[in-house]
Amino acid sequence: MTNPSAQTDPQNPEPSPTIRALTHAFALLGKRWNGLVLAALAQGPAGFGEVRERVPGISDRMLADRLHELAVAGLLTRTVHHGRPLRSQYALTAHGNAFLIPLAALAVWAEEHLPPHPDRPRHKTLAGQS
């Protein structure tokens, strides 16, 4: 990977390919809740209520928006089960599963390098370890 800090060449004011790729990735994955929703689905497919339970603090509207956005981006699927009541189940796609590798690495990095938040306990990693 190229050095992300080397954003521009003085001769060429265009951002480097790395900066362009990171800008594109963080436009979606840097939004609040998106990473946590994907991490919640790493535990397996789930209905709306189960995803909400796995992501404490997210509102129903925000969860609906994030699930829709991640589905449009191709990171998860929504399967509608007809009947009463109508149910939807969400699951990671191959692209969503591929994101779990850097997401787990980011979680490890945060545990090792960021100061703990005084109001929050350390969270379990994606692998389920403390």
Image (spheres, helix red, strand yellow):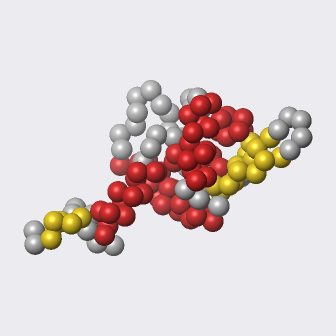
x, y percent for residue 60: 62, 30
x, y percent for residue 46: 73, 46
Left or right for 106, reference 5? right
In the rendered image of this protein, does residue 46 appear above or below residue 100?
above
x, y percent for residue 65: 57, 39
Q: Is residue 36 visible?
A: no
The extreme left residue here reads 10
Residue at x 15%, y 71% (from the top left corner) = 12
Rendered image quadrant of residue 20: bottom left
Comparing 45 with 27, the one in front is 27
Task: Name the image quarter holding the N terminus.
Answer: bottom left
Residue at x 71%, y 39% (from the top left corner) = 48
Rendered image quadrant of residue 23: bottom left
Q: How many marks?
A: 0
Comparing 71 with 130, the one in front is 71
Comparing 13 with 54, the one in front is 13
Residue at x 30%, y 62% (from the top left corner) = 19
Left or right for 49, reference 20? right
x, y percent for residue 130: 56, 46
Residue at x 24%, y 64% (from the top left corner) = 15
In the rendered image of this protein, does residue 8 appear above or below residue 71?
below
